[in-house]
Image (tube, coloured by chain):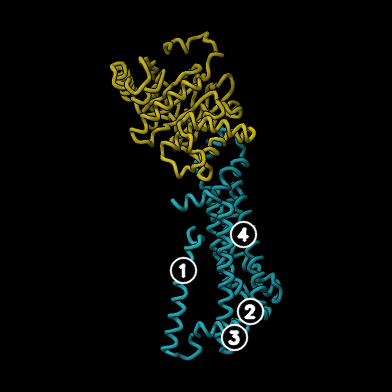
Chain colours: A cyan, B yellow
Amino acid sequence: MKFLRGGAWLPPTVFGAAALGLWELLLWLTDPEGFVLPRPSEIAVALGENLSEVWMASRVTGFIILSGLAGGVALGVVAALVVTRFRTANEMLTPLAVAINAIPIIALAPLFNNWLGITSPRSNQAVVVLLVFFPVFINTARGLTEVGDEQVELMQSYAASDWRIMRTVRIPNALPFFFTALRLVASLAVIAAIVVEYFGGRQDTLGNIITQNAQFTRYDVAWAAVVAGSVVGIALYFAALILERLVTGRYARVTAAG
Amino acid sequence: MSTPESQGAPGAVTENLVLEIAGLEKTFNPDRPNAVAAIGDLDLAVRPREFISIIGPSGCGKSTLLRLVGGLTEPTAGELSVNGRSAQEARLARDYGMVFQAAGLLDWRSAIRNVELPLELMGWSKSRRRSRAVEMLKLVDLDGFDSHYPGELSGGMQQRVAIARALSFEPALLLMDEPFGALDEMTREHMQTELLKIWRETATTVIFITHSIPEAVFLSTRVAVMSPRPARIAAEIPIELPERTPHVRDTEEFFRSVSLVRRTLRSVEAT
């Protein structure tokens, strides 16, 4: 990926700085009421003033995100391996997965709070796990099954077992699909975790900071928590990207370069 | 090269045959309304070091025949033995090197690691399979491309890697299903010359599926013509050429063989 190399940081950084500058300038010129949109400088000040609170909340919410992400990814991968390997499992599991995906899972957050305890992280984790599961499952299963017939027949002509074909052909073939899903769900998990926190629960979470401060028209503080959430999301996205580079190695660089 | 009659003759010495097929039948979806009789009562015998091309009308079951020989699908009836073993046993004993129209390389493995793949499955040590793979890539004129990924190679080069891979473990039988079908004419002729060179150097027996008559004539010691479905071997034509170099394509012997195969193919299709 080009933007992981040194010089490639420059254009997005310049663009981002310019956008923030324009935002600041437009608000300075039009000077709307504070609750419409705070200036970036105001958000920065609010972030500085509430740094310890936002930091602690980021850790609490970050834990939910990471653990939910890990659980959902693990479930998705295991389910994909199982449905690829066993035809009957495919017939049973895939419709179930599709049905789960059709449920507006975030809307069930109050029910999860009810089932698993409103202050327990379990209900938040459950929502993140369920949301993360489906994209990982579908993409990985696709990568495991979309293998050339001739590649499978070739392996069979070498007397390779099904498990060996899985390890040597299917799993490597699924890696790019899996990592695409991972990048997608890295951001999805952040959204899910924060939105679930809007429904109540512990006080020391990013979602709660946003709702509480918005209620008392302290939008600059709410925005500071949004910034923290974005930082977590971006960090996870890049972590997924770096992991992909580490796992797929030179092959990925070669093919990315064309 | 002997005539077709002598091969099917009673009392032929079985040990001398790499492949022996008698009364082979393959019906897809048997006993169902959509049953398709792909192959019906097919006989074929192949001796060691032969290069036999199988040619026939499209959709006549050439690939099915190759997959039956390779033990990738089971016949409905008939006998098929490879060095005295069943196709399944031969497959499990790794008697086959297969090359398909699609090179079927693993994109995430470098050229050399693709060639090493069958050796890896056979449990060869790392150093042994590496040195063999280097040797094989040299054989197909790809030395220096060891660490290239399939995506960095041309179609012809990918197909050469596939051939190197198929030959790496010295299989008893090389099964090729239109391996040059996707290549342009120039590359194709070049690959044919290369394949002949490899065939001579490795003492392999080759069964080669194609629908190009000149290709079959140029490569083969014998051309087997398949009938339309349910397919059988309708005719076997021994090919005698003064030499197997690109120039032979301009000789009278070559044209005579090509037109003989063409006439045979036409008469088979007409029936």
Element at label 4: helix
Q: Which residue is mark 1?
A: A12
Q: Residues within 10 Å of mark 1 (few under 14, many from 20)?
A: few
Return the disc, 3 or 4, that comes first in the chain's sequence: 4
Whether residue B230 appears in this view of the structure is no
Q: Is residue B94 left or right of residue B64?
A: right
Instruction: Give the Cα separation between the discs numbered 4 and 1.
Output: 30 Å
Q: Residues within 10 Å of mark 4 (few under 14, many from 20)?
A: many
Q: Which residue is mark 2?
A: A54
Q: Please say if the residues under marks 4 and 2 sit with CB atoms less than 8 Å apart.
A: no
Image spot of residue B236 (x, y percent): 40, 17
Instruction: Give the Cα separation between the discs numbered 1 and 3.
Output: 31 Å
Instruction: Give the Cα separation between the discs numbered 1 and 2.
Output: 26 Å
Element at label 3: helix
Same chain, labels 3 and 4: yes
Q: Nearer the viewer, mark 3 or mark 2?
A: 2
Element at label 1: helix
Which amino acid lies under the numbered mark 4 shown in the image of this protein?
A: Val
Image spot of residue B238 (x, y percent): 39, 15
Image spot of residue A213 (x, y percent): 59, 86
> In the rendered image, which quarter is residue A219 located in?
bottom right
Return the disc, 3 or 2, that comes first in the chain's sequence: 2
Q: Which residue is mark 3?
A: A213
Return the disc, 4 or 1, that comes first in the chain's sequence: 1
Q: Which residue is mark 4?
A: A73
Same chain, labels 4 and 1: yes
The one nearer the camera, B104 or B144, is B144
* Disc 2 chain ID: A
Which amino acid lies under the numbered mark 1 shown in the image of this protein?
A: Pro
Q: Nearer the viewer, mark 4 or mark 1?
A: 1
